[in-house]
Image (cartoon, grey):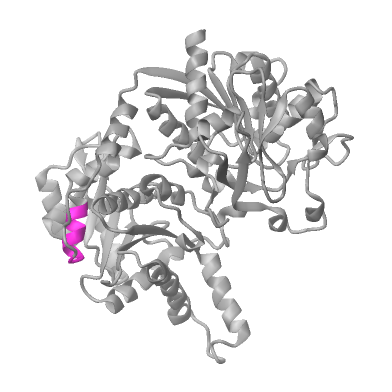
Amino acid sequence: MAATKYIFVTGGVTSSLGKGIISSSLAKLLQARGYSVTIQKLDPYINIDPGTLNPYEHGECYVTQDGAETDLDLGHYERFLGVPTSQANNVTTGRIYQSVINKERRGDYLGKTVQIIPHITDEIKRRILLLGKKHKYDVVITEIGGTVGDIESLPYIETVRQLRWELGPKNSLVIHLTLVPYLAASGELKTKPTQHSVKNLLENGVQPDILVLRTERTLNKDIRKKVALFCNVDLPSVIESIDVKTIYEVPLLMLKEKLDETTLIKLDLPILSPPELKPWKIFVDKLKNPSKSVNIALVGKYVELHDSYKSIIESLTHAGAVNSARINLKCLHSENINPETVGEILSGNDGIIVAPGFGDRGIEGKILAVKYARENKIPYFGICLGMQCAVIEFARNVLDFKDAHSTEMTHMTAHPVIDLMEEQKGVAEKGGTMRLGSYPCHVNKNSLVFKAYGKKNISERHRHRYEFNSDYLKSFESKGFLASGINPDSKLVEIMELKDHPWFVGVQFHPEYSSSVLKPHPLFVSFVEAAILKKESN
């Protein structure tokens, strides 16, 4: 087998230009041409992983099948490629330094002075190359977080410089994503920021091979020529990435710009059969041309930053396309919901989702949202804490356990319907009590969720600490709130489902982590379908 080829994606001028989307789009095109591809993210922050980061700081924490808490860009990788990622696909500066310091403490460096070069860069190199060697991919795309010129990114850029020399010509490629801003006052697109960004890269010894230019306006040939001339790349390597309505159009845009062909030529890889993108094009067409619309409320406590619930929002997009429906999503702050405002805030919605989260801030607003959905027969989807809120609400208002709560919020309750398992209670470290990664679940054949999945045995990803207290299960089921999914090993309740309601499901896991463009998650598809039926019945 030929050696793995490596593509490095860097960003300049400003953050949030979409390196993850460009990386995912290129990977999708190469995959559609028959190549095996994966993407990894190198994050320059010193946290070990995003698991302890506030969602306002970094958006959602994405969880892989093997239980790694990773950057949200890994969600884009999986949604575009339909291929699972793992711990190896996300590397942080914190993890790099931790590994090097552990080696130094063990004496692995034989008493040498430990330095950025070669010790830190060698460890980064090892992590980059490991993915290609371990899984024998044809192409590994490495996205480097941050912006060229940031102090924290320097070791990664230096590593790229070294690797390009070590891998030799035709085995690696640098794609640099920059911004070409439009100045309305002068009516001009300005290339100077891109030139300065490339100059920054060159000062660090790295010459980009391909430039992808984010822009609001079409780039004419003169602008492309100017960028090519001043940035030392050939004209076909100046790629336009114009703003589009949906991120799922970007692969089609990059195909039109021949990003994949240019990449293959520079890596000396054969241009195999044209990319098979018919299912993708059908998805994009249905997404852009819906025949109906539906109003969905997402109740959470980090709603100011949409990236906090990125996977849920994208899963709804996938499910909307399947149902030929536009999702009119209202992100509602749970702290604004109280007994006086709940009706006004939630009226007019065809479906309600209560989002995951930790801590007691906004919890009573979430519980009120559950009550509103239950009493008004509005399709309800509770995810992780959203399931726990449904359990608490039902215990208080149907079972008449007025002080029912989760012991995460209060230890004083006489009815801890959500609690830690016994074996978790002695563990002091928060991470030690977390259930992370994929766990099996057996679905009741007579349930609504079985109709959605179409199978009894499923596996879903978890990220939580507290569980449904099974001591109360008989009380719940006697009143019609049924456990329709059980972990076969631990016997923990994973899915709760309400009888005599159009669609009321709470899941302890995170189905949003498993939804992709060409394989939307069945629970989101079923939930959106129920919301459409609710709207039509009105």
Pinpoint residue 332: horizontal percent, then vertical percent.
58, 26
Work out whether residue 351 can be spotted: yes
Q: Nearer the viewer, residue 183 or 456?
A: 456
Which quadrant of the structure image shows residue 506? top right
Pinpoint residue 216: horizontal percent, then vertical percent.
26, 37
Secondary structure character of the magenta stretch overall? helix
Tally of numbered discs: 0
Q: Residue at x 67, y 21 (%)?
A: 499
Does the magenta-highlighted stretch encompass residue 515?
no
Which quadrant of the structure image shows residue 110? bottom right
Does the magenta-highlighted stretch encompass residue 262?
yes
Q: Residue at x 19, y 35 (%)?
A: 187
Work out whether residue 243 can be spotted: no
Q: Is residue 454 above or below residue 435?
A: above
Quadrant including the N terminus = bottom left
Q: Nearer the viewer, residue 18 or 254?
A: 254
Task: Tell me if 326 is positioned left or right of 476 in this view.
Answer: left
Q: Is residue 320 above or below residue 311?
A: above
